[in-house]
């Protein structure tokens, strides 16, 4: 069944779907009265619903039954990415959402080649949020990750204080054979705790940035013997976290 993240509900028995999802239901999926969909409310509760009413502006869906599903990682992982070139952040957000990321924070790094244009900020962030929403629906998530507007490195350091654990992936650590920090951090974590994973842009992080991160309680880690691209490293880390928490038993 098609899944939709819904914002409006009349009560615990009915949802109202409008905007792009309304268009998707009637124009793309061409659904009719009586057809079933899955609705996920803002709290992550999931319900099988039946379409009860279709108007020019909204779809009303009645709850048939609430479902017990658990498709979320037991820890909350935020991906902080140094702004990369082109559409690489699109890929990070899409695949990172499929792999269970809770939040994405793009930031302007010293070696970011792309310059952040504040005039285009709203449209960019809306695009990333739409990508996250569609990926969350496709992968049957109960939570739609948030993609925040890009922040400065200084602001990122301030935001980092709210996380239980903080790691920065650094290629020099991989070259030097560091293999234990990432794995040992995952072993320490308990259900419900938060982890901020930080990755540099194409040119990597500067030594000055690494020093500031260390001073702000980030542990520096490698991600195996191979040097990963800026769009590959976050996906590797999320997959490794999924394996550790969801497949190792």
Image (cartoon, grey):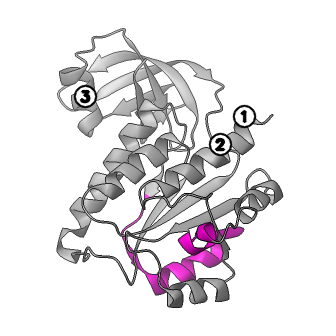
For the residue labelled by badge 3, is the local secondary structure a helix, a strand or a loop? Answer: helix
Residue indicated by mark 1:
247
Residue indicated by mark 3:
24
Q: Is residue 105 left or right of residue 134?
A: right
Q: Residues within 10 Å of mark 1 (few under 14, many from 20)?
A: few
Q: Earlier in the sequence, mark 2 or mark 3?
A: 3
How far is disc 2 from disc 3 in space, using C-alphas?
Answer: 31 Å
For the residue labelled by badge 2, is the local secondary structure a helix, a strand or a loop? Answer: helix
Q: Are marks 3 and 1 in contact (CB under 8 Å)?
A: no
Front residue of 129/16: it is 129
Q: Is residue 232 left or right of residue 129?
A: right
Residue 163 lies in the magenta stretch? yes
Position above or below: 177 against 13: below
Front residue of 36/131: it is 131
Which residue corresponds to the image point at 54% horizontal and 68% vertical from the top-left? 198
Residue indicated by mark 2:
242
- Magenta range: 147-175
Position above or below: 58 against 121: above
Position above or below: 151 against 105: below
Q: Is residue 235 left or right of residue 237?
A: left
Which residue corresponds to the image point at 42% horizontal and 62% vertical from the top-left? 230
Q: Are marks 2 and 1 in contact (CB under 8 Å)?
A: yes
* Extreme-top residue of the structure: 34
Which x, y percent locates residue 61?
A: 40, 22
Position above or below: 234 against 50: below
């Amino acid at each position: 069944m098609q899944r939709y993240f819904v914002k409006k509900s009349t009560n615990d028995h009915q949802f109202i779907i409008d905007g792009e999802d309304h268009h998707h239901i009637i124009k793309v999926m061409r659904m009719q009265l009586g057809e079933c969909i899955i609705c996920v409310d803002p709290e992550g509760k999931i319900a099988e619903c039946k379409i009860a009413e279709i108007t020019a502006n909204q779809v009303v869906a009645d709850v048939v039954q609430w479902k017990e599903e658990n498709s979320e990682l037991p820890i909350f992982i935020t991906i902080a990415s140094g702004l990369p070139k082109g559409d690489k952040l699109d890929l990070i957000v899409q695949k990172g959402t499929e792999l269970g990321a809770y939040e994405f924070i793009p930031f302007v790094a010293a070696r970011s080649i792309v310059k952040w244009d504040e005039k285009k900020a709203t449209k960019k962030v809306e695009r990333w949020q739409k990508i996250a929403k569609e990926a969350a629906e496709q992968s049957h998530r109960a939570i739609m990750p948030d993609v925040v507007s890009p922040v400065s490195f200084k602001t990122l350091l301030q935001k980092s204080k709210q996380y239980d654990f903080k790691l920065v992936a650094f290629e020099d650590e991989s070259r030097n054979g560091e293999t234990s920090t990432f794995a040992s951090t995952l072993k320490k974590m308990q259900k419900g705790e938060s982890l901020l994973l930080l990755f540099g842009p194409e040119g990597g992080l500067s030594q000055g940035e690494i020093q500031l991160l260390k001073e702000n309680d980030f542990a520096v880690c490698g991600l195996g013997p191979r040097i990963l691209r800026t769009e590959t490293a976050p996906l590797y880390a999320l997959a490794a976290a999924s394996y550790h928490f969801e497949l190792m038993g």
